Image: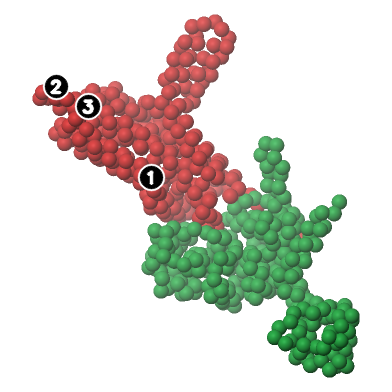
Chain colours: A green, B red
């Protein structure tokens, strides 16, 4: 797979005015996003996600380092912008316009006119499932519909790259699922997606790779499988007798939860699962299931950010 | 994840100030600006503050005809009509000046900061739109709003005056034409401040300052003349600064035909007014203001 977005030692320092302190937005970012993948770009507020996106779009300028998009360095040029669709977080679309009028405005900025523009609008409205509401005023749209119109404007030029800032934030579960399905379809069409989000579950569900950013530094980056390792095992058993439970806890097994006559035992990765199972067998504890538990993206995120903050606090 | 090392480390910067255009690109450039201008106009005309100013000004202009009914009838015939017409003229000219400039400043100060706040600017500038194209479109949109408002207020004034005197007040049309150039200058400089701001407060204050100082520049010449009468070095320095400012600041009084309208017949030609010179004067200042806006916005981090 070819590299579509590439940054090398990309650094952005926001210079403060008179007497102020400069703020580091991004530090030595080395990123390579491949063609046809969904890249989840994660980080807490102020970690540098939006700074990266603005740099990629040429809305702000780097302090040092370089960016290549589709092998080109003329970031912010019309040729590059035609290849990128961008959905900003919480963007506003004028209330007094109809859905299709919003798209006409953005389409005209691509130089589209007449039938070309009309057919392109028909196409993107169909992709985002908004054909039925195209003649309704934006003021009558739900949050999910506004977000889908936002997706439609990002897709107008049939771009190779889509940069989406918080595409599912604030949406209800059904709207989230719909947006997720649209994103998966776009990936299947071969588009490259860079998704900046706080919705870790959403990102985990659709991303091929993720990068976690903290304090302007990329802390970790890799495929979901590389980053989310199996860390421990859960054993579901019928409520064991007190003696059996004592033996298990003495062996280091933790009681994770008790639900309706059943107990979920948590076996930390440093402990032998066989040892726990042997105790259960010898004490006649009825097993329901034994399952490895993979670390969630949320757990990884909290761990990585926590480690980064600890590192920051070190003298 | 480490990317493959690029062979050249280049720092991307803003688009070049000027690049060679083909005719097709030139047309596309203005089409893009026109699209943004139309959108700015459509959105601007829906701003509640602007509509409020407009309604208020129309009410005052419309009401000026009725206010004359409360005049004490101490004179008869043509003399009474003249007093009534003078009152209407006075009220309408003042209304157009005040509300017109408020609308101009409000709209010039708010369009760019508002788009930064609601993030529309990001969706627009992520399209193949140059910053200059965006800025020009915004400026076109502002001018469309200013022209429409001026035409509405001027049109009502025209009708009120015609209804009173039954003479086509052609002089008024010349006055409104020149008033537009006054507003154009104020608009361009307010717009320049707006391009450097994230809120519309500072540009609004700056716009009002430009309008007020633009009407007081004649006093600067007085200061210079009086400063020359003493030998005090401080007075001389103040005088030099005053004359320097007099040369630099736009004299917005030049665009006023108030006295012509008040004391000449409505269909008299505007005497002693060099229209081409005044238009050139207004355009030069407007271009300067716009260029400042462009230079500020060109390197601005959004």
Question: Residue lying farthest front?
Answer: A242
Mark 2–mark 3 Cα distance, whole angstroms, equals: 16 Å
- Residue at image mark 1: B50
Counting from the top left corner in percent of width and height, residue A135 is at 38, 68
Counting from the top left corner in percent of width and height, residue A199 is at 63, 68
Question: Residue lying farthest left?
Answer: B77
Q: Which mark is residue B74?
A: 2
Q: Which secondary structure, mark 3?
A: helix
Residue in front for this viewpoint, A99 or B202: B202
Q: Chain of mark 3?
A: B
Name the residue at 18% across, 35% down. B162
Q: Quadrant of residue A42?
A: bottom right
- Residue at image mark 3: B86
**Which mark is in front, 2 or 3?**
2
Are discs 1 and 3 less than 8 Å apart at CB? no
Name the residue at 43% across, 35% down. B186
Do tags 2 and 1 sit on the same chain?
A: yes
Residue A70 appears in the picture as rendered = no
């Amino acid at each position: 797979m070819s590299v579509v977005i590439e940054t090398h030692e990309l650094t952005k320092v926001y210079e403060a005015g008179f007497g102020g302190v400069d703020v580091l937005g991004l530090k030595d970012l080395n990123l390579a996003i491949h063609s046809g993948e969904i890249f989840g770009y994660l980080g807490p507020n102020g970690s540098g996600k939006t700074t990266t996106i603005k740099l990629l779009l040429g809305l702000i300028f780097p302090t040092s380092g370089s960016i290549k998009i589709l092998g080109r360095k003329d970031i912010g040029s019309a040729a590059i912008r035609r290849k990128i669709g961008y959905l900003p977080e919480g963007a506003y679309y004028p209330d007094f316009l109809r859905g299709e009028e919003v798209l006409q405005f953005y389409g005209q900025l691509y130089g589209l006119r007449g039938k070309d523009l009309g057919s392109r609008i028909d196409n993107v409205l169909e992709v985002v499932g908004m054909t039925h509401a195209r003649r309704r005023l934006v003021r009558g749209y739900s949050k999910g519909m506004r977000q889908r119109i936002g997706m439609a404007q990002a897709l107008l030029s049939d771009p190779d790259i889509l940069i989406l800032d918080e595409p599912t934030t604030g949406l209800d579960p059904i709207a989230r699922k719909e947006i997720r399905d649209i994103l998966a379809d776009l990936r299947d069409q071969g588009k490259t997606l860079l998704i900046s989000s706080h919705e870790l579950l959403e990102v985990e569900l659709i991303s091929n790779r993720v990068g976690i950013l903290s304090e302007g530094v990329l802390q970790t980056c890799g495929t979901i499988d590389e980053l989310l390792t199996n860390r421990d095992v859960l054993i579901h058993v019928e409520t064991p007798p007190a003696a059996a439970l004592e033996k298990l806890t003495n062996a280091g097994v933790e009681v994770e939860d008790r639900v309706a006559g059943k107990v979920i035992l948590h076996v930390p990765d440093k402990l032998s699962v066989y040892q726990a199972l042997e105790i259960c067998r010898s004490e006649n504890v009825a097993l329901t299931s034994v399952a490895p538990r993979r670390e969630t993206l949320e757990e990884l995120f909290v761990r990585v950010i926590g480690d980064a903050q600890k590192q920051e606090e070190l003298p | 994840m480490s990317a493959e090392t690029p062979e050249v480390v280049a720092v991307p910067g803003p688009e070049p100030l000027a690049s060679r255009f083909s005719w097709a690109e030139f047309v596309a450039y203005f089409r893009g600006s026109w699209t943004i201008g139309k959108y700015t106009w459509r959105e601007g005309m829906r701003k509640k503050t602007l509509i409020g100013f407009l309604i208020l000004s129309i009410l005052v202009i419309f009401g000026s005809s009725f206010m004359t009914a409360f005049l004490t009838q101490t004179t008869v015939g043509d003399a009474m009509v003249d007093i009534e017409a003078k009152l209407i003229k006075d009220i309408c000219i003042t209304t157009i000046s005040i509300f017109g400039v408020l609308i101009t400043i409000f709209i010039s100060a708010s369009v760019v900061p508002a788009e930064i706040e609601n993030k529309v600017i990001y969706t627009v500038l992520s399209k193949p739109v140059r910053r200059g194209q965006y800025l020009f479109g915004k400026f076109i949109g502002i001018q469309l709003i200013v022209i429409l408002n001026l035409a509405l207020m001027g049109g009502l004034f025209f009708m009120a005056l015609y209804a009173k005197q039954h003479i086509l007040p052609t002089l008024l049309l010349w006055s409104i034409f020149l008033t537009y150039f006054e507003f154009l200058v104020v608009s361009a400089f307010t717009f320049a401040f707006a391009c450097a701001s994230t809120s519309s407060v500072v540009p609004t204050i700056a716009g009002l300052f430009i309008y007020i100082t633009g009407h007081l520049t004649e006093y600067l010449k007085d200061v210079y003349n009086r400063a020359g009468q003493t030998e005090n070095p401080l007075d001389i320095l103040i005088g030099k600064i005053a004359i320097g400012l007099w040369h630099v600041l736009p004299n917005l009084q030049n665009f006023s035909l108030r006295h012509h309208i008040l004391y000449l017949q409505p269909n008299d030609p505007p005497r002693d007014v060099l229209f081409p010179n005044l238009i050139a004067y207004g355009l030069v200042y407007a271009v300067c203001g716009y260029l400042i806006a462009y230079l500020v916005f060109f390197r601005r981090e959004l």
